[in-house]
Amino acid sequence: MTELFIKYYQYYKSLGDKTFEQLSEEDVFWQNDPGSNSIAVIVQHLSGNMVSRWTRFQTEDGEKSWRNRDHEFEVHLTTKDEVVQAWEKGWGVLFEALDAVTDEQLCQRIEIRGEPHTVADAVLRQIAHYAYHVGQMVFIAKLKKESSWKSLSIPRNESGSYNEKMFRRHDTDPLPQHSSPVCFAEDDEVRDEYRTDS
């Protein structure tokens, strides 16, 4: 199960990585209007959150006393390289923490701002949070790049050909074990009528 969670985190990180590949330094600090966040500010927030949440998360509250969340929304990085370094730092802390989590530990209790969560709850909470902000990054980048933006999903008017390609690719693929949080197709615990290996 932990491997599945990591896979989803890797997917959202990859969307951010592919976004950075299309951006100049000016693009990273661009704001649509004075009240909106730039990609740089969103990354400052994501990195601050990740480092706080995932540092010693099994023994300490996820909201560390040394975190200054308000500071994350003030521009203090000055180059694209610094922004990318902050991005990589946050994800590095996250992946190092999750790599050490076993499936048996997913039901253990931890706290975020004093609120109790299981490890699994916290992992899912943060997936949703990070996906939200990565989506903002992609949207801001698309606004800035306009017609030069290269789509990170299925390009417009190409859904049919994409679907055909995917169905051909997966037509004979076996269902991977633990392919989703609710699909344990080959586990001993699954009732016989739902098994795929019988």
Image (cartoon, rainbow, N blue to C red):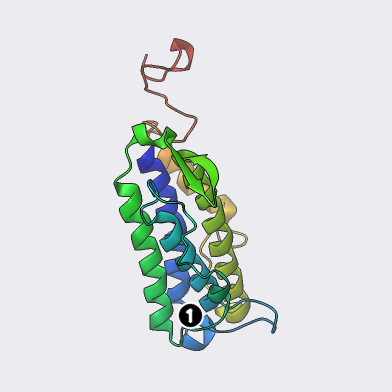
In the picture, measured across the screen, residue 95 lies left or right of residue 119, that is left
According to the image, label 1 marks what residue? 23
Q: Quadrant of the N terminus?
A: top left
Q: Residue furthest top?
A: 192
Amino acid carrying mark 1 in the image: Leu
Q: Provide residue 127's location: percent of width, then percent of height.
A: 50, 51
Q: In the figure, 66 relative to 26: above or below? A: above
184 or 69, which is in the foreground?
69
Q: Provide residue 117's location: percent of width, then percent of height.
A: 51, 41
Q: In the figure, 191 relative to 164: above or below? A: above
134 or 58, which is in the foreground?
58
Residue at 60% in and 66% down: 136
Q: In the figure, 56 relative to 44: above or below? A: above
Residue at 48% in and 80% down: 23
- Density class for disc 1 (Cα within 10 Å; few <14, some 14-19, many ≥20) is some
Residue at 43% in and 83% down: 80
Q: In the figure, 65 relative to 19: above or below? A: above
Q: Provide residue 197's location: percent of width, then percent of height.
A: 36, 18
In the picture, measured across the screen, residue 182 lies left or right of residue 176, that is right
Report how many numbered discs are placed on residues in the image: 1
Q: Secondary structure at mark 1?
A: loop
Q: Provide residue 41's location: percent of width, then percent of height.
A: 54, 76
Q: Quadrant of the C terminus?
A: top left
Residue at 37% in and 22% down: 186
